């Protein structure tokens, strides 16, 4: 066989070989894409939190600079959005912070990209790094809203509880150098297990699929968290009362192809 004919046959065989390899890779990409799932993003609203914090501090005769909204909180909290507060000096007439008192940080999770699954509750984290202040989370004075802004009662979820939901809840106290991490849900999410007589979460607090089915302006939910900050010692010291609005926008994150330009390939 002439040399030119052998070379032509080799080129044809190589071409067929590479076409087969490309087809196999293409099918593998399709299989990977079939397993990809859409995700959801819970995007916090730092502006509304910052405005409410500044307004409440000013109304209580304190400097708005005592409270700050941070894009990333320090450990042991998650490196995500939250607020920090420098309590005022223990003297009732003082309006400036005491450098030795430390910070109080508050955060509500989850935030950012998450699996497209219902949320059974929101994680509330309160870090008290002060030396002379006590933080109390008042669950009964807090509220949860979703889409239509109808207030729902907040319940701190404790597994295995037998409590009557009609009774007042005990406040959660965070003493100096302590961290509170609690799961908060809504009263209407609970039901009574007839076998164990224990309260259990029967429905999710936030259903992303439901929220994503409505127009973007109403894809929101919020936890208004009531805090009271009180000096541990000192007579006549006035407590600081805050109602912190942690609001979130829900957005869909479409799964991305592992091969960005696959749509250019012939199907």
Image (tube, rainbow, N blue to C red):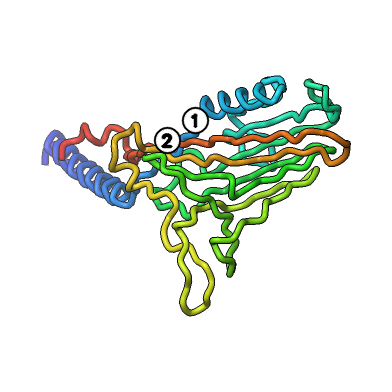
Residue 199, horizontal then vertical, whole percent? 52, 67
Q: Are marks 2 and 1 in contact (CB under 8 Å)?
A: yes
Q: Residue furthest front?
A: 236
161 on left or right of 62: left
Residue 52, by quadrant, is top right
Residue 124, compared with residue 86, is above or below; it is below
Q: Residue furthest right?
A: 234
Instruction: Please tell me which residue is depicted at 64% across the width and 35% down the height of the picture.
Output: 242
45 on left or right of 171: left
Instruction: Using the image as rendered, state which of residue 228 and residue 122 is in the foreground.
Output: 228
Around disc 2, counting alpha carbons within 10 Å, would you say few (fewer than 14), some (14 to 19), or many (20 or more)? some
Around disc 1, counting alpha carbons within 10 Å, would you say few (fewer than 14), some (14 to 19), or many (20 or more)? some
Instruction: Using the image as rendered, state which of residue 193 and residue 100 is in the foreground.
Output: 193
Instruction: Using the image as rendered, state which of residue 52 and residue 81 is in the foreground.
Output: 52
Instruction: Please tell me which residue is depicted at 26% across the width and 47% down the height of the picture.
Output: 30
Give the number of the disc on residue 249: 2
Instruction: Please tell me which residue is depicted at 52% across the width and 25% down the height of the picture.
Output: 47
Residue 141, horizontal then vertical, whole percent? 59, 45
Q: Where's the N terminus, which quadrant?
A: top left
N-terminal label among 2 and 1: 1
Give the number of the disc on residue 262: none
Residue 24, horizontal then vertical, whole percent? 25, 49
Circle 2 SS class: strand
Residue 135, by quadrant, is top right
Instruction: Please tell me which residue is depicted at 80% across the width and 37% down the height of the picture.
Output: 130
Judging by the rendered image, the residue that carries numbered circle 1 is 45
Give the alpha-carbon distance from disc 2 to disc 1, as whole Å: 7 Å
């Amino acid at each position: 066989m002439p040399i030119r004919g052998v070379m032509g046959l080799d080129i044809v065989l190589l071409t067929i070989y590479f076409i087969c390899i490309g087809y196999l890779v293409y099918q593998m990409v399709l299989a990977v894409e079939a397993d990809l799932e859409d995700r959801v993003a819970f995007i916090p609203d730092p502006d509304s939190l910052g405005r409410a914090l500044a307004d409440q501090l000013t109304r209580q005769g304190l400097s708005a600079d005592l409270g700050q909204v941070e894009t990333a909180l320090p450990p042991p909290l998650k490196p995500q959005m939250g607020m920090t507060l420098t309590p005022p000096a223990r003297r009732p007439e003082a309006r400036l912070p005491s450098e030795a008192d430390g910070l109080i940080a508050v955060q509500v999770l989850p935030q950012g990209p998450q699996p497209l699954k219902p949320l059974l509750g929101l994680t509330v984290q309160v870090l008290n790094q002060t030396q002379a202040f006590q933080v109390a989370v008042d669950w009964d004075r807090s509220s949860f809203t979703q889409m239509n802004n109808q207030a729902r009662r907040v319940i701190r979820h404790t597994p295995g509880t037998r409590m009557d939901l009609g009774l007042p809840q005990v406040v959660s106290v965070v003493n100096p150098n302590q961290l509170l991490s609690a799961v908060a849900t809504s009263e209407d999410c609970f039901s009574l297990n007839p076998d164990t007589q224990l309260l259990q979460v029967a429905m999710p607090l936030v259903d992303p699929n439901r929220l994503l089915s409505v127009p973007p302006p109403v894809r929101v939910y919020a936890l208004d968290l009531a805090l009271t900050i009180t000096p541990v010692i000192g007579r006549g010291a006035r407590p600081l009362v805050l109602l912190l609005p942690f609001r979130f926008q829900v957005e869909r994150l479409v799964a991305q192809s592992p091969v960005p330009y696959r749509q250019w390939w012939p199907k």
